[in-house]
Amino acid sequence: MRKRHAASARWLGVLPLLLALAGCLHVPAGRVTMDRMDYGQVIAESWKRQTLLNVVRLRYADAPVFLDVSSVINTYSLSGSVSAGGQVSNTQLGGDSISMGAGGAWSNTPTVTYQPLMGDRFTKSLLQPIPPAAVMQLMQGGWPTDLVLKTVLRSINGVRNDSLGVGGDPGFLEIVGLLSRLQRAGGLGNRVEARKDGSAVILMLRRESRSSGPLEDARRVGELLGLDEGINEIEVVYGFAPRSGHEVAMVTRSMLEIILNLGAGIDLPAGDAASGRVLPGLRQTGEEAAVPLVHIRSGAAAPEAAYAAVPYKGQWYWIDDTDIASKRTFTFLMILFSLAETGQVPAAPVVTVPSR
């Protein structure tokens, strides 16, 4: 009898341990970090591929499609079970036996919501030229002057940039180079003035310097842009030509025009250009060729390593992962897209999570 009670006591002592084990089952907090990194990486890659595909589609005169991931909801379910049993023999021939077990079930059900970007506001954001004030703010925010101006501008004070495969005026790249050096030397800035007819952006050229470099660069910029001699503050306006020697007139591109310009740098499969399936590329008869903003390669098979790669009409198109200049410009385009008006009215998400 004493042995029977001792065995029962051992069995009852194990049962609380099993119950405690089952009660410790819970969704670990580390899943938040893992999910955020994993979903964020996948969304970023899909965003790059969608943008690249739209660049290729527009080169083939095909309609672009913009699809946004508006929400990602992940629901976890975790359940546990415990079982135990025992048998105590009252004879000396039989032995005591105890059986016990614990189990758990884990599942997660992600829900991803896609939303097409369309409507009046989104279409206008694609077709409207980028405001000159935004161009100056991008430069003031630290983006390299050469990247911003070569990507966004069509012309400055009538000096033309490369556009849709056609080479621009030689003075444009010189102006961009001079302004880039001034930016790095701290000799370039801007401010916004509030006026009755709206705000105005003032470009400031710093001519005071211990080095002769910024002084000479500022003088040369003024000469190329036709500015009044010795002027330090210039008003930035939208237009083809300035109204006075105190203005800088910029003709800026729309987001759609920027995408079309990026498509001019595609290495097309043999025969596609000659067959008339695509829009004109980097060279047109009798005109100087433009320098591509982004070099997009093509081939019959997917590359082993690429910054972004997409299939289209039986071919693969990609940006090489070692082409840092193309990667930088393409990333800049994606950031400009993130600032564009989506056309959708923002609203607080309504989420229903079932109890389990």
Image: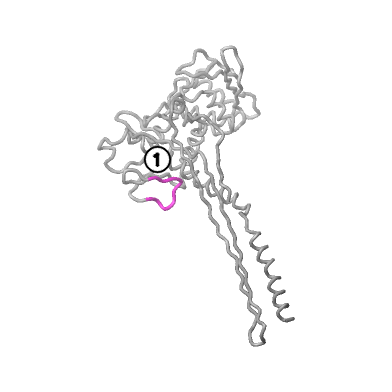
| Residue, disc 1 | 53
Closer to the camera in the image, 248 or 331: 331
Give the image location of residue 19, x and y in percent: 66, 63
Query: Is residue 202 shown above or below 275?
Result: above
Closer to the camera in the image, 286 or 135: 135
Give the image location of residue 123, x and y in percent: 43, 27
Query: Is residue 69 rendered magenta in the image?
Result: no
Give the image location of residue 301, x and y in percent: 35, 51
Quarter of the view holding residue 182: top right
Residue displayed at 47% across by 47% down:
322
Closer to the camera in the image, 94 or 315: 94
175 displayed left or right of 210: left
- Which residue reaches farthest right? 2
User: What are the residue bounds of the magenta stretch?
Assistant: 302-310
Helix, strand or loop at mark 1? helix
Residue displayed at 42% across by 40% down:
52
- Which residue reaches farthest left? 275
Which amino acid type corresponds to the residue marked 1 in the rendered image?
Leu
341 displayed left or right of 100: left
Query: Is residue 86 shown above or below 188?
Result: below
Give the image location of residue 140, x and y in percent: 59, 29
Closer to the camera in the image, 180 or 93: 93
Alpha-carbon neighbours of circle 1 within 10 Å: few (<14), some, or many (≥20)?
many
Query: Is residue 107 shown above or below 115?
Result: below
Query: Is residue 306 rendered magenta in the image?
Result: yes
320 displayed left or right of 40: left
